[in-house]
Image (spheres, rainbow, N blue to C red):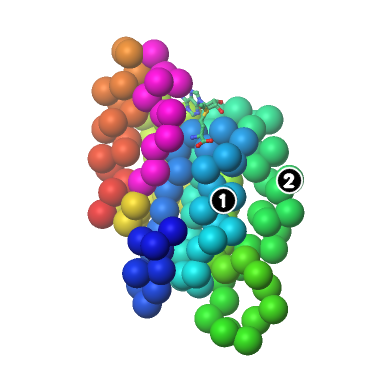
Amino acid sequence: MKLFHNFKSFFLTAIFTLSGTGSSIYPLLSKNANPKLQIKAYDYSAQAIKFVQANPMYSTAQITDDPASSNPIVGSISASTWDLTSPQLPPNLPEGSADLIILVFVLSALRPEEWAIAVKNIHKVRI
Ligand SMILES: C[S@@+](CC[C@H](N)C(=O)[O-])C[C@H]1O[C@@H](n2cnc3c(N)ncnc32)[C@H](O)[C@@H]1O
């Protein structure tokens, strides 16, 4: 959380691969003070993504620079399906676009033979 405060004046894109049900995303978003934070979350399970999108914070999160805004959630979040072992990056995630990539229980969710392509994808999106 401190890290995001420190980057207050910068546009910051954080990527969560394998979002699961959002157990890492939402505690972080709820404490975020950087209005320019954009969170992009992916999971290959449509069920997991629906769950992430059903969180009330998903719709209230917005990009705002207005300190007088009454919205308690600052920053924005998008969650979509994507297979981390796919040969292509998702359409809303260009190469070299992520300042920070957060991987919680990610490689352990994959088969060892999928690790190389997963690491390659992660490497492609980092700035
Ligand atoms: C342990 S959870 C991730 C937990 C999450 N990082 C967090 O902080 O709460 C593992 C998730 O990986 C997803 N998953 C497994 N293999 C995947 C793949 N190849 N591509 C995308 N998601 C995958 C599963 O659907 C599941 O939701």
Q: Which residues are magenta?
A: 101-111
**Element at label 2:** helix
- Place of residue 31 in the rendered image (x, y in percent of width and height, measured from the top left): 54, 61
Left or right: where 37 falls relative to 52: left
13 vs 27, nearest the viewer: 27
> Is residue 106 a member of the stretch shown in magenta?
yes
Q: Quadrant of the N terminus?
A: bottom left
Instruction: Reply above or below: 68 against 111.
Output: below
83 vs 16, nearest the viewer: 16
Pointer 2 residue = 54
Instruction: Reply above or below: 26 against 114.
Output: below
Left or right: where 65 falls relative to 100: right
Say the numbered circle drawn on residue 6: none
Q: Tag 1: Cα neighbours inside 10 Å, few (<14), some, or many (≥20)? A: few
**Element at label 1:** helix
Residue at coordinates 69% horizontally, 78% vertically from top-left? Answer: 70
Give yes or no for contact between labels 1 and 2 (Cβ–Cβ under 8 Å): no
Say the numbered circle drawn on residue 27: 1
- Residue 82 seen in the current view: no
Residue mark closest to the camera, 1 vs 2: 1
Residue at coordinates 39% horizontally, 43% vertically from top-left? Answer: 102
Q: Quadrant of the C terminus?
A: bottom left
